[in-house]
Structures are given as structure tokens and as C-alpha cells.
Amino acid sequence: MIGMDERDKMFEKIVSDLTRHIRINTGFLVWIGFLTVSLIVCLYAYSLQLKHGLGVTGLRDYVSWGLYIATFVFFVATSLIGMLISAVIGLIGMKWVTPITRIAETIAVAFAAVAGLVIIMDMGRPERLAYVFLYGRFQSPILWDVTVVITYFVLSLLLLFLPMIGDMAVIRSKVSTLPKWLKPVYKILSLNWTNAPEQNRIIARCIRILLILIIPAALAIHTVTSWLFAMTVRPGWDSTIFGPYFVTGAFVAGSAAVIIVMFILQKNYKLHDYIYDLHFNNMGKVLALVSLVYLYFNINEFIVPGYKMKEGEAYHLHQLLAGKDAFLFWFVQIGCLVIPILLMLFRRFRKPVPITVISVAVFFGAWLKRYIIVVPTQEHPFLPIQHVPHNFMVYTPTLTEILITLAPFTMVLIIITLISKFFPVIPLCETARERDIENLKIE
């Protein structure tokens, strides 16, 4: 049995360890300054698109979806990791996920929040976005997609906020080095939490309800996104497996993102006593498992149309396997999926540094895979290409388009940086409870 004095000391150490990064320092200002300047450059590129239209991009009549839609699908995919870590693994009682649940939810909120903005980037007339809500047709998958993205974002935000209520109350009352401007923010967001048993029961009940609700919402968000492609008859998209295929790919991208952020936060915030080799090893196993399932869907995606070999599918597959898209295709399949899976089967490659390097490759490959899904099939239109400029036949992103595409990635980094800098990245109260430190009165 832990004595009162010893328990207080342990709790003070946990509070100190998990809040020492909540301060304004030079490194933070330099990083935020760099991201801000980068975002301004990207927004300037977007202002050119607003002024001159989508003609400043590589998008044309045949390839009307390019980097923007590939990035949108990727962002929606990565946001699903909050559901996998918090709901699926958390609800089945895996206690090892406790230190990384908030990291996963932060990633989910950041990517879900920005995903909708990516759609606006692809619109030549963004002021007409309101028409989706005013005149949306129930038959349109676009209306479903907008609805589930908003729903999933709200649920993810609540799952990030509710477990943080107690942490903010603890920090407000016990951390004297808290920046002055943050204290009233913490006071408002802590909602007069005092660690009373009834308060804990209410929060626990709400969190459990959200964890259950977010599972169908998360499955819906990427299934509906897949329907934007699958509900066409275009070769390469006309598939009945796109729903589970997209969901599995989402878990791959999200798991890789969690490992990368885990590694960065562990090193920068000195969290070695809370995030250690066990977490990297287990997340490596999760990434290997979902990657194996994703590999199965990749094989199924090509072997079925390859067996039937319809004319349109035959040409599309030839371009992917041996044509102009072959290098990119095989780089993604072998370099970013098969080789990482083989490496992750060995424990030594699930150590912090190796698994982080593998995750970077998988994460990058996950974005390239969305590009392969979106672009190549549009370069083979149903009707013959006649009497059109050469740049209508081949999609080549312009510098303006690339800069605009970098904007949402910069926004995600800003959101993750701000949340992880001014709030505990590891659940403080839950960590204390798991270490038998309970019933502490908060003033």
C-alpha cells in the first residue's frame, strides 16, 4: 500500500514530467515561425488560384482530380487512427495504449479538421460550398461525405477534450510555471472539475459512449469516401471492395503517423518514463498487422480485374504494372509495403529508431498510393482523345499546385504542435490512476 506522502510525491513527479513542456521557448518560436512563413507562401499560391482559376494547376478536362483529391483521401484516412487506438484497442482492455491515446486523438482531430479544407482547394468556385448544404441531394455521395467528415471531427474533438478536463484542472492548481495567458483558458476548459467521484463517473460514461459511437462514424467516413470512386464505372475505380480496402489503408497511414509523432514527442519532451520500447514494439505489431491486411486488399484489387481482363481494365493494369506508372506503382508496393512488413516481423526492427524510419516510409507510401488510385485511371478516358493540347493527355502538377497541396500538411503540423505544446500529450489523471494514485482533491 502506498503511503500518503509517497503518493503525493509520485503524483507531483507525474505532473512535473508531463507539464514541463508547457512553456514558450526559443525552439517552439522558431518552429512555429517556420510553419507560419511556409503557410503564408502556400496561401499566396492559393490566392493565385482564386484569381486565375484552376488553370494555374495541372488539372484539365480529362484529369480533373489530382494532388488535391489524393491529399483529401489521405487526410481522411489518417484521421481514422483515433478510432483504432482509443475505441478498438482501448475498449478491449489493452492498457498499454493509455500513454498514446491522446497522441492518436490529436492526430485524428488535426487531419479531420483540415480534410474539409482540402476539398475547398479543389473547387474553382469555393464560395459555392454552401450549396452542398442548401441544395444537397441525398443521392450524392458528396453530401454523405461532408456529413460524416463533420460528424467524425466533432466526435474526435470531444474524445480529445473530455479526458483532458481533469488534466487541465490539475495543471491549473498545481503548476506554478504555467504561462499567465493560459491560466484563464485552463480554468474555463476544466469546467470546475474537482476530482469528485460523481464527476469522474459522468466523464467516464460520456467517454465510453463516444468510443462506441465513433466506431461506426469512422467506418462510415472512409467507406463513403471510397464510394466517391466506386460508384462510377471507370476502370480502376469500379470495385466492390473499395470500402474495406480504404478503411484498412486508413489504419496503415494512421498507425505510421502515431509512431512518428510518438518518437518526436518522446525525444523532444523527454517522455522516456511514459513512452518506452514496449509502446513502439506494440505499435509496430499493429502496423504490421494492418499492413498485411492492406497487402491482401492490394492483391485483390488487381488480381480480380486482371483475371477478367476487360479492355479498359487491361490497359489500366498494363500502365500500372509495366507502363509509365510502373516505377511509382512498384516503389509503393515493394518499398513502402512489402519490405516494411518483412522488417516489422523481426523484433529488432520494432525498436524506436528502426520502426520510426519504417513508419516514415509507410506514411509516405500511403500518400503515394492515394495518388496512384486517383490519377492514372483518369489519364485513360472512355472516349478517344482528339484535337486537344498535349497537356490535356498527361497530368503534371504545377509549382502553384504543389505549394497549395503543402498548405494542409503545414496546417496539420501547426495544430499538432499547438495541442501538444500547451496541453499534456499523455493523459495525466489516467496515468496517475494506473499507478494507484487516486482520490486527490483538486482546489
Image: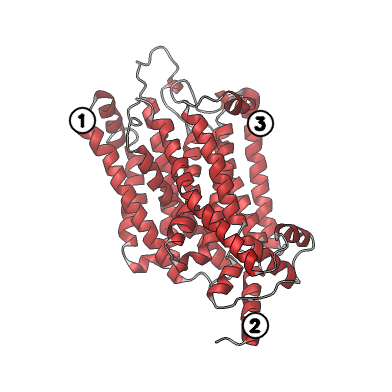
Asked whether disc 2 touches disc 3, contact meaning CB atoms under 8 Å apart, the reply is no
Q: Amino acid at mark 3?
A: Ser
Residue that extends furthest to the front in the rendered view of this protein: 198
Query: In the picture, which quadrant includes the C terminus?
Result: bottom right
The mark tally for this picture is 3
In this orientation, does residue 126 appear? Answer: no
Nearest-to-viewer mark from 2 and 3: 2
Q: Which residue is denoted by mark 1 in the rendering?
A: 308
Decide: few, some or many residues near mark 2? Use Cα within 10 Å; few <14, some 14-19, many ≥20: few
Pinpoint residue 252: horizontal percent, then vertical percent.
41, 51
Mark sitting earlier along the chain (1/3)? 3
Asked whether disc 1 touches disc 3, contact meaning CB atoms under 8 Å apart, the reply is no
In the rendered structure, find residue 208 and report the number of the disc placed on it: none
* Distance (Cα) linking label 1 and label 3: 46 Å
Residue at position x 61%, y 87% from top?
A: 3
Decide: few, some or many residues near mark 3? Use Cα within 10 Å; few <14, some 14-19, many ≥20: some
Q: Is residue 23 left or right of residue 217?
A: right
Pinpoint residue 42: horizontal percent, then vertical percent.
62, 39
Image quadrant of residue 384? top left
In this orientation, does residue 440 appear? Answer: yes
Pinpoint residue 398: horizontal percent, then vertical percent.
53, 31
Residue at position x 37%, y 16% from top?
A: 385
Q: Amino acid at mark 1?
A: Lys
* Distance (Cα) linking label 1 and label 2: 68 Å
Tell me the SS state at disc 3.
helix
Nearest-to-viewer mark from 1 and 3: 1
Q: Which residue is denoted by mark 2 in the rendering?
A: 9
